[in-house]
Image (cartoon, rainbow, N blue to C red):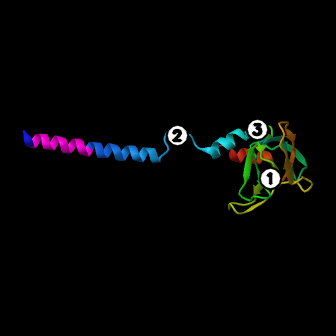
């Protein structure tokens, strides 16, 4: 009977130690805790992001036909911060919207020109404004984008279908 009691106490002790270790690990994972000051600041500064919206049109260079640039990725890179990048994807009608922090942004659109990822060309039309300034405003700024493509948009759409 004494041996059994000693074994039971030892098992209880081991279980308590394991429970304490697991509780300490969970506490280190910040489970169920608020994210902290940085997340709260970003959340409450959301209204300071300015809405930018517009329509993206693609001109096929061989025929001068214009089409809405459906499902096109548009990149906005802040000039004073190379890693500060925002992205917007157009809907099928070429419309997009994005919210940008205050600052000047470079607009980037690339089209693939070959089978390798590194083979691409600038998709913005030569006359297209390449910079946009975002100011703190609840009102939306309209910024339409003109693209040029060497591949007919209908061919691109057919290639994307399964």
Q: CA distance from mark 1 to mark 3?
A: 40 Å
Tell me: residue 148, above or below residue 30: below
The percent coordinates of residue 155 (x first, y second) are 76, 47
Which residue is more in the foreground, 95 or 76? 76
In front of the other: 120 or 51 = 51
Q: Residue at x 77, y 47 (%)?
A: 101
Left or right placement of residue 70 versus residue 116 in this view:
right
Q: Quadrant of the N terminus?
A: top left
Is 3 left, or right, of 30 in this rendering? left
Q: Which of the two discs, 2 and 1, sits closer to the camera?
A: 2
Nearest-to-viewer mark from 1 and 3: 3
Task: Tell me the SS state at disc 3.
Answer: helix
Q: Mark 1 or 3 closer to N-term? A: 3
Query: Disc 2 marks which residue?
Result: 33
Count every numbered label the image shows and give the total.
Answer: 3
Could you tell me which residue is drawn at 91 percent across and 49 percent down?
64
Tag 3 residue? 47
């Amino acid at each position: 009977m004494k041996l059994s009691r000693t074994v039971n106490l030892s098992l209880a002790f081991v279980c308590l130690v394991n429970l304490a270790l697991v509780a300490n690990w969970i506490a280190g994972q910040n489970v169920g805790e608020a994210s902290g000051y940085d997340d709260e600041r970003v959340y409450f500064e959301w209204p300071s992001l300015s809405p930018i919206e517009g329509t993206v049109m693609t001109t096929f260079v061989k025929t001068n036909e214009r089409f809405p640039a459906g499902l096109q990725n548009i990149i906005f890179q802040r000039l004073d911060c190379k890693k500060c990048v925002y992205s917007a994807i157009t809907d099928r009608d070429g419309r997009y919207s994005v919210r940008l922090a205050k600052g000047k942004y470079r607009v980037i659109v690339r089209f693939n020109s070959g089978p390798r990822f590194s083979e691409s060309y600038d998709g913005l039309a030569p006359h297209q404004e390449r910079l946009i300034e975002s100011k703190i405003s609840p009102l939306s700024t309209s910024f339409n984008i003109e693209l040029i493509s060497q591949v007919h948009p209908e061919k691109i759409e057919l290639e994307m279908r399964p």
